[in-house]
Amino acid sequence: MTRTVHAFLLALKDLPHPRVLRILALSLALTLLLLAASGAAIFFAARWGLEQGRWLDGSGLDMAGILIALGLIAGGWLLFRTVAIVVVGLFADAIVADIEERHYPGAAQSAVEVGWRQNIMLALASLARVIVGNLIAMPFYILLLVTGVGTVLLALAVNAVLLGRDLEAMIGARHPARPRLDRSARWSLGLLSAASFLVPVANLLAPILSAAMAVHLFHLRSDNEKRGLS
């Protein structure tokens, strides 16, 4: 965990860099656009369905629209992590390349270039994992609602595992010959990333911050191994 916290602090220092800020702005704009577009589509489709079914009319239909909107806002907050990581996956190679060029030039020279096609495949694999993982955990989320905090803690643990895997895959795509992170490093990476998504406002920075942290953790591990061998 100490190494992961070190990687997190290094990632914080990377945030003000112009290229990182540019990628952050693009990825955040695309994430919010996708959430807004899907939310609007669901809202109008639900209202149209209620009108066609003639289940509600007048004030009842307006109240249902308000409840749908509130549900979409809550759902958007919950889905932000999923959409944001998928979108960041599209820019993953640019983020990783930028940090490696500035901090780990030797690794940048030996890296394999990852094209858009592979970035899209990584993003889709991330989306599939988060959907399947959370669907499997859904019955347990429901059962733990009575505990008050159990559902949140289980969701944090599940998404820590998924995020650790996603972030490792982003870096590993550029360095396929290098060994992967050990289980504890991957877990601590995912846990810090998942926790950062729970903090309002800070969660807007969480996708880029998590990707930068993964780069540092991956290469700090490699540097430590080299020093241990020398």
Image (cartoon, rainbow, N blue to C red):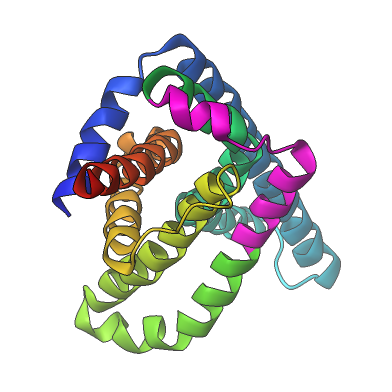
| In front of the other: 101 or 178 | 178
Q: Quadrant of the C terminus?
A: top left
Q: Which residue lies furthest to the right in this view?
A: 52
First to last magenta residue range: 104-127
| In front of the other: 111 or 47 | 111
Q: Which residue lies furthest to the front in this view?
A: 230
Residue 143 location (% of width, % of height)? 35, 89
Note whether 153 is above or below 6 in the view shown: below
Q: Residue at x 55, y 23 (%)?
A: 23
Q: Residue at x 60, y 34 (%)?
A: 93
Res 123 seen here:
yes
Note whether 23 is above or below 171 in the view shown: above
Q: In which quarter of the image is the N terminus?
A: bottom left
Residue 212 location (% of width, % of height)? 40, 35
Res 70 seen here:
no
Note whether 195 is above or below 106 in the view shown: below
Q: Which residue is drawn at 36% across and 40% down?
A: 219
Residue 114 inside the magenta-drawn segment: yes
